[in-house]
Amino acid sequence: MKRNIAVSLLSLCWAGSALGQSDGSQTFPGEADTSLIVTGSRSGDLVPVNLTGASVTVLDQQALETRQTRIVSDILRDVPGLAVSRSGTIGGFTQIRIRGTESNHVLVLIDGIEASDPYYGEYDFGTLIADPMARVEVLRGQQSSLYGSDAIGGVIHYITLTGKEAPGFSARAEGGSFGTAAGTVRAAGVSGDLDYALSGAYYRTDGTPTARYGSRDIGSDNAGLSAKLIWTPADNFTLTGVARYSYTRAETNNSELDPGSPAFGYIVDSPGVYYRNRAFYGLVRAELTALDGRWTNAVTAQIADTQRKGYAYGGLDNGDKGQRYKGSFESSIRLGDDSLSHRLTAAVDVEREQFRNLTPSDFTFQGKRHTDNVGLVGQYELSANDALSLGASVRHDANNRFADTTTWRVQGSYRFATGTRVRGAYGTGVKNPGYYELYGYSDGRYIGNSDLKPEKSEGWEAGIEQELGGTSTIGATWFQSKLKDEIYTSYPAPTYVATPDNRSTRSRQHGVEVFLSARPIPQIRIDAAYTWLHARENGAVEIRRPRHIASFNATIFSRDERFSGTLTLRYNGRQQDQAYTDPSYVPVSVSLREYVLANLNADYKLTPSITVFGRIENLADETYEDVFSYATPGRAAYGGISVRF
């Protein structure tokens, strides 16, 4: 039955040309404008999606609301090319992989701030709960020529809305299965020359067991505070400030480490084990325009300060902390007119990442280290008659720890009068080694390698989209990439002590992404996506990257727009993972079976300001694992009330 559901879902994705919207890029009455993105250019300008050569998906405010998104990683399962792996329940370490690349090959921005943990070199999506009013831009493909290290697979940009975009006061409270309680509050608007948006979100749950054969419920407390202020004292000057704080306290389970136990290498109940993660992000940006708005200069300063500590009965068991300080200058000039325009952008990024291991162990290197990097960016963008766009970018990074690198990208798009759009891109990417790869873990079984080289990627994509009747769009993209100097873990004899190294061979990824977006009538919205992926590392199947991934979302609105209901189906195909069940600590390959998650959401406006809502998650009570031996929640029901003025 489950396989039939999956096959039907894939058929809908392919056969949906009878319906159709554009990869989140069309605007319908009553919806926010999703036809413009900010992530695809260093100019700071909003760029039309239909004039972008790259693959872009926009998850707008309405999508987050109708799918009742509480944890951002859940809705990212609906984006073509993305694979989500969560270690158990909410609060568990969560990784996102784009187009078969590694999770640390994804650059994550939150309101323009680089958000990855400087110690791990990647972002834990298990700590990101959804804000009351937000949207997500996902830019796929190599983007290092704009953003430097990390952007091999692409960029995920989580953006909270401004006071102008979503004014007013709102609050939400809900509860449900597994002892879950959650709420949000937001106040936003425009007062004179000040645009403000202040919000807070909280999510707690008693959780469910995460050990495959265990009974210990793994709960978590998650909180987030966000502030965005935009001051415009003059028509040509804007000062923006962003501050964000996130906190997670989550119980965890460990792997069985006793080689004599039949559960060796499996996740087992571990009473008293938990972690705390806190992060502060800040940004200040000053922007000045001249020449009647044709020339923009901007200076930005940002900080990311993260700390993660793991605890056991004996107290602090492991921990790390890191900071990223970054300053940028961007200058962009626009030439031409509406029929033919040119945009030239130059940027300088000066960045320092510093990190330290806090683990109290004789096996741990606890010294403080830092990496300095200066990036020089040049970008050219051309658009003609709202149909043709061409772009090229190049970046040179000078690094005090690794060899200097130069990355580049070219892309183009053309839209015919028939509503057909063709596009393509070719680019390169780079990823610098992380602290734990350079200096090792804390258990004496993993030794770092300070001689590691950055990983480098090169790839291309070609896509075609077709608009149907102004209400639908269907599209497909072929992508292909190769990675060299890939960092992997080796287990050399005779000691078999794990250590990272660079591969001499190349890893390759290629696949197809298909999407469908439709609003055939105002009362129906349909979004679907499918990805076929072939990813090999030195000839072996890459772990936690299913060959087939698909999603289907259908929302029905009443004519008076007081009621809406959404059905969500998310299919995750069979995938490989690694298990450390061999006493030699050399991993063995295991297969995780396919699954389908079905959610059903509904909301009803009692008054223009008061709404009641409810949802059922994992409707079929599917048993599944994203990560080997980590059990996941079963069927759950939630309900609540929201107010908006």
Image (tube, helix red, strand yellow):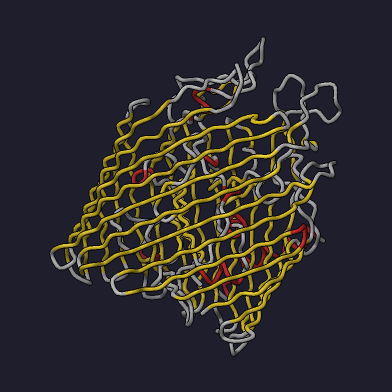
Q: Quadrant of the N terminus?
A: bottom right
In this view, 274 is above or below 384: above
Q: Can residue 504 be seen here?
A: no
Residue beneath the point at 59% across and 62% down: 529
Q: Is residue 233 left or right of residue 2?
A: left
In this view, 230 is above or below 332: below
Residue beneath the point at 58% across and 65% down: 184
Q: Is residue 289 left or right of residue 364?
A: left
In this view, 310 is above or below 344: above
- Residue placed farthest to the left in the image? 291
Q: Which residue is more in the foreground, 325 or 440?
A: 325
Q: Is residue 74 left or right of residue 152?
A: right
x and y percentages locating residue 584 in the rendered image: 73, 19
x and y percentages locating residue 358 in the rendered image: 55, 28
x and y percentages locating residue 440 in the rendered image: 55, 23
- Tell me where residue 557 sits by quadrant: bottom right
